[in-house]
Amino acid sequence: MNKNGVSIIEILITLSIAFLIFGISSFGYREWQTRVQLTNDRDELKSVLLRVQQLATAAAGGTSWGLHLEADRYMMFAGDYYDENNPNNRTWSLNGSQILNASSTFADGAGGFIPDTVFAKFSGETYNTGTIALAPLITTSTTKIINVAESGQIY
């Protein structure tokens, strides 16, 4: 039998296969994008923590330095306590990620938990130890972790 064209069934099968491949690949792409963004947010937060510790070790401004956490952002501050009204605070926003349990991430040295870690001037040590857990906004099944030890080690 001699065919001079393409049947509607062949077109529908071809389109179905194309949409199936597109659907699978777009899901994989979104997952990959989420993991990359989570890794970027973790790396930037870790970099800011290291910067805060460096400022404290150098006693920049003659004081200790700290970092305050909120679910969707974090702030660098000078001094022993976070003051949300201080215009010198520097803020970073998370892009597509969240800090899990931000308000109770760090030990306060008295048996409780707080959202701040403060590094001592000159030594860079902290009593506010803890684990920062970052997760994508859409799911908390994947997390990235940053640990802050009493010695000031950030890993």
Image: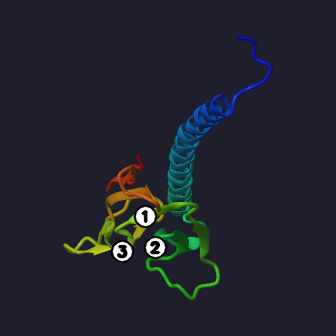
Element under disc 1: strand
Horizontally, is 97 left or right of 113 in the view?
A: right
User: How much space separates mark 1 and mark 2, taking CA atoms?
Assistant: 7 Å
Q: Residue furthest bottom?
A: 85
Mark 1: few, some, or many residues within 10 Å (few <14, many ≥20)? many
**Residues marked 1 and 2 touching at CB (< 8 Å):** yes
Residue 22 placement, left or right of 104:
right
Q: Label 2 near label 3: C-beta < 8 Å?
A: yes
Amino acid at dot 1: Ile
Residue at the spot of label 3 = 103
Name the disc covering residue 57, or none.
none
**In the figure, 89 relative to 143: above or below?**
below
Q: Nearer the viewer, residue 28 or 55?
A: 28
Looking at marks 3 and 2 on the same chain, the residue that comes earlier in the sequence is marked by 2
Q: Which residue is mark 1?
A: 99
Q: Residue at x 47, y 60 (%)?
A: 122
What is the distance, in whole Å, between disc 1 and disc 3 at their CAs?
Answer: 9 Å
Q: Earlier in the sequence, mark 1 or mark 2?
A: 2
Q: Nearer the viewer, mark 1 or mark 3?
A: 1
> In this rendering, does residue 123 appear at all?
no
Give the alpha-carbon distance from disc 3 to disc 2, as whole Å.
7 Å
Residue that badge 2 annotates: 70
Dot 3 surroundings within 10 Å: few (below 14), some, or many (20 or more)? some
In this rendering, is residue 149 above or below 29?
A: below
